[in-house]
Image: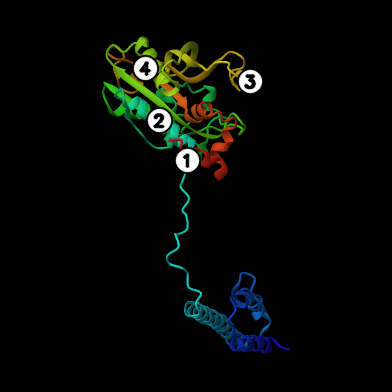
Amino acid sequence: MDIFDRVKALQEEIDQFTTQDAEALEAFRIRFLGSKNIIKPLFSEIRNVPNERKKEFGQLLNTLKQTAKEKYDSTRAGLAQTTQKGGDIPDLTLPGMPVAEGAFHPVSIIMDEVIDIFRRIGFSVAEDREVEEDWYNFTAMNTPEDHPARDMQDTFYVLNDPGRLLRTHTSSVQSRVMTTTQPPIRIIAPGRVYRNETVSARSHCQFHQVEGLYVAEGVSFADLKQTILYYAREMYGPDARIRLRPSYFPFTEPSAEVDVYWGLKDETDYRITKGTGWLEILGCGMVDPAVLENCGIDPDKYTGFAFGMGIERQAMLKYRIDDIRLFFENDRRFLSQFSAAK
């Protein structure tokens, strides 16, 4: 049987096809219209057809496809009409299909809670771009050119452009606000950040932060401590205790790490606090005068404090989640646990 006879035989098969069975119709669809249908390989046979008949052969194949499509559509419409007339009509008095409720993502729950806590004491929300310029992400934040954070091991640069990157912290929002707004400034900057880190149970290449900034006349470290204490008691309970440990950040001086007392009530507490009962929740400090000057704010007139926390870290603490990767896997079994948490 030559190639034209094969096409003719398929055409006859389509023309003669008739059924009242949905399964047979589906088999017809797979045979003639599916991703691996019987017609598709015939198009590669065009190269073997004499030149003077290539056009004729191509037209036959197109007609074959169109006929198969029309046969399928008409048969399916006939089946649907027969079903409606044949008594297989759904009982319209039955209750509808249940619609599953969506779940709040734990990161969204904690993010909203943090924002609400700081809004109650006068902080407004500032947001900006995730693809950032080096100056706002590093230079304005008093990060020298030889600082390890600039190394490609920590930062995702865009198209190998050292002047453009995925922001490594939401401090870039702070620098943009300070370059366009004169004090008093009282903002929080929530958002997603990126760092070129190995993904593990405790770290990820993308995560969420909320950073805060307060710049005005006469702002002191005591103001910072009271603000953080207020946050800890709103988030972890009215009896929450905090401690501040000296630390280093290029954009604050002095700088501190803040721990909240978690306790040692059970084995889980002992493990996540490494036997101390204390858990680190954020970093903070007084804004370095060089940062204020970089952003066009007079450091002799104004002072300020800043703080920053990882939202996944807060969620892991609050819900006792031991693997940060769970936040990014879209596992409905995990996410459904938080449907009523907000």
Crowd tier of the residue under label 3, counting other residues whose Cα lies within 10 Å: few below 14, some 14–19, many 20 or above: few
Quadrant of residue 252 within the rendered picture: top left
Labels 4 and 3 touching (C-beta < 8 A)? no
Residue 55, percent across and down?
A: 57, 85
Q: Is residue 270 above or below residue 112?
A: above
Of the two numbered discs 1 and 4 in the rendering, the one whose residue sits closer to the viewer: 1
Gap between marks 1 and 4 measured at Cα: 30 Å
Of the two numbered discs 4 and 3 in the rendering, the one whose residue sits closer to the viewer: 3
Determine if residue 80 is in view.
Answer: yes
Gap between marks 2 and 1 measured at Cα: 15 Å
Gap between marks 3 and 1 measured at Cα: 28 Å
Gap between marks 4 and 3 measured at Cα: 31 Å
Residue at image mark 3: 267
Quadrant of residue 213 within the rendered picture: top left
Which SS class for mark 3?
helix
Name which residue lies at 26% across and 21% down. Answer: 184
Q: Earlier in the sequence, mark 4 or mark 2?
A: 2
Give the residue type at disc 1: Ser
Of the two numbered discs 3 and 2 in the rendering, the one whose residue sits closer to the viewer: 3
Indicate the quadrant containing the N terminus: top left, top right, bottom left or bottom right: bottom right
Q: Earlier in the sequence, mark 2 or mark 1?
A: 2
Residue at image mark 4: 227
Residue at image mark 1: 339
Q: Is residue 127 above or below residue 273?
A: below
Which SS class for mark 1?
loop
Residue at image mark 2: 113
Labels 2 and 1 touching (C-beta < 8 A)? no
Gap between marks 4 and 2 measured at Cα: 16 Å
Give the residue type at disc 4: Thr
Q: Is residue 327 above or below residue 185?
A: below
Q: Earlier in the sequence, mark 3 or mark 1?
A: 3
Which SS class for mark 2?
helix
